[in-house]
Image (cartoon, grey):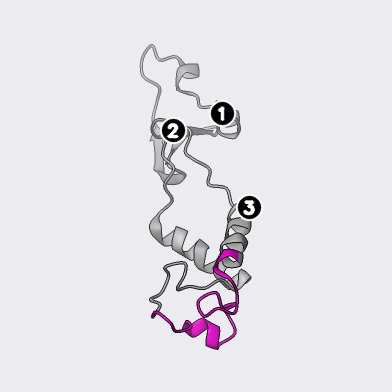
Amino acid sequence: MACSPNRRAALQMLQSLADEQRLCYGLLGLEPLSRGRACFRSALGRCAGACCGKESVEAHRDRLLAQMSKLQLVCWPWAGPVALEERGPDMTQYHVIHNWLWLGRRRLARPGRGADPSARRIRPGWLQDPL
């Protein structure tokens, strides 16, 4: 199962969490932190001060963990890409999705000879309750 969001999205989520909760970018590894000095955000009042002793590192960690426990990373539950069928009166097309990314669509000009239409059909309910 793929369970890896891209790095940029993960960093943006962590920054957003830090902004909302006044967490220290330096302690989170989002910016450099000089030993013995408060971070830049602390001077602006955007950090509660775990970097300079105004807040304990334990309290900072507890606030971080409390907020992270509310986040949920939903892993891709299939071994590879899946196709969602979209059918209209004059066409059938399949939307290909892998690791929560839409990869594109393919139109089916006509079914192959002897093909079982139910074998190619991906039921939308499978995406909601895969396993």
Q: Position of residue 55 (x, y in %)?
A: 60, 75
The mark lying in front, picked from 2 and 3, is 3
> In the figure, residue 61 lies in which quadrant?
bottom right
Cα distance in 3D space between marks 3 and 1: 25 Å
User: Is disc 1 in contact with disc 2, using a CB cutoff of under 8 Å?
Assistant: yes
- Amino acid type of the residue tagged 1 in the rendering: Trp
**Horizontal and vertical percent for residue 16?**
55, 67
What span is in magenta? Answer: 34-58
Q: Which residue is mark 1?
A: 126
Side (left or right) of 112 relative to 17: left
Pointer 2 residue = 82
- Left or right: 48 as drawn, with respect to 107: right
Residue 80: image x %, image y %? 38, 33
Which residue extends farthest top?
114
- Label 1 crowd (10 A; few <14 / some 14-19 / many >=20): few
* Badge 1 or badge 2: first in the primary sequence: 2
Whether the magenta-drawn stretch holds residue 111 is answered as no
Secondary structure mostly seen in the magenta stretch: loop
Residue marked by disc 3: 70
Q: CA distance from mark 2 to mark 3?
A: 28 Å
Q: Residues within 10 Å of mark 3 (few under 14, many from 20)?
A: few
